[in-house]
Amino acid sequence: MAALRRGTAYFSFVRNSARVLFSSRKPAVSKLGKWTNVIYTGVASLAVGAGLCAVPFKQVEPLSHDTLIRRAASLVTDSSSTFLSQATLALIDTITEYSKAVHTLIALQKRYLASLGKLTPAEEDSIWQVIIGQRAKVNDRREDCRHFESVWFTAVKLCETAAEAAYTSGADHASVTARTNIEVAQSQVEAAQKISLDADKKLAETKVMEVERMAQHAASLENNDEEEVPEAYLRED
């Protein structure tokens, strides 16, 4: 404020001086006019400058290397956690679809076994075509599970590395968050894998049942053939 008052006082002094100069002889007016413009411009700049100097500015302190490293580590953990989340979702969805395909195959095989000896050749062939198609679908879903399982393992390793880097750099919160995300992802995948393993177990049991029923059905057909041969032979006699 003191600088502003000094500038205002100086401006008044120059303005009064300019009036005296203008009241002098006319030939000097044109020359003095140029100097007057320069004086007014300089005084105006001085007054504005004095006002700006009175406004305080807050200087931003530069960030330290440790702070920048911690921020970078936090970004890495966020990105790796996002990658892990997407990989986990893809793997769980694929495992779920695989389990559904397996249960559908089990239902088809049980239906076929229950209808042994009751189907015409055309009906039996039709059911077998459906079963073969479902088995191919199960194999495709199994390959999808292997693919996304590989991606998921890579995501887990990346997230573990990011968590370790965050801990080393001092970003403790980011490290704890990343490790928590890993534990949650692992528990979700384990739950889905249990359902998948249960489906595989039931499929194996159904295959054993299929082998037994097919063997029984073949034996029954052989017995029927053996019983019919003597009767035909006796009729010929």
Image: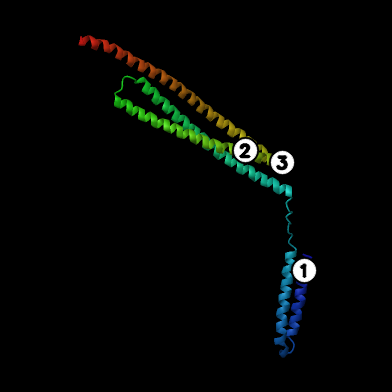
* Residue at 51% over, 34% down: 145
Left/right of residue 166 with respect to residue 212 in the rendered view: right
Cα separation between marks 2 and 1: 69 Å
Q: Mark 3 points at which residue?
A: 168
Q: What element carries label 1?
A: helix
Query: What amino acid does circle 3 point to?
Result: Thr
Closer to the chain start, of discs 1 and 3, is: 1
Q: Identify which residue is drawn at 38% across, 16% down.
A: 216
In this rendered view, identify the residue nearer to me: 13 or 159.
159
Q: SS class of the residue under badge 2?
A: helix
Residue 46, picture quadrant: bottom right
In the rendered image, which residue does mark 2 sit on?
A: 157
Q: Quadrant of the N terminus?
A: bottom right
Measured as percent of width and height from the top left, residue 232 is found at 23, 12
- Specify the quadrant that holds the C terminus: top left
Identify the residue position indicated by label 1 in the image.
Answer: 5
Residue 49 in which image quadrant: bottom right
- Foreground tag (2 vs 1): 2
Q: Earlier in the sequence, mark 2 or mark 3?
A: 2
x and y percentages locating residue 217 in the rendered image: 36, 17
Pair 2/3: label in front = 2
Q: Where residue 72 appears, x then y in whole percent?
A: 67, 47
Residue type highlighted by circle 1: Arg
Nearer to me, 92 or 110? 110
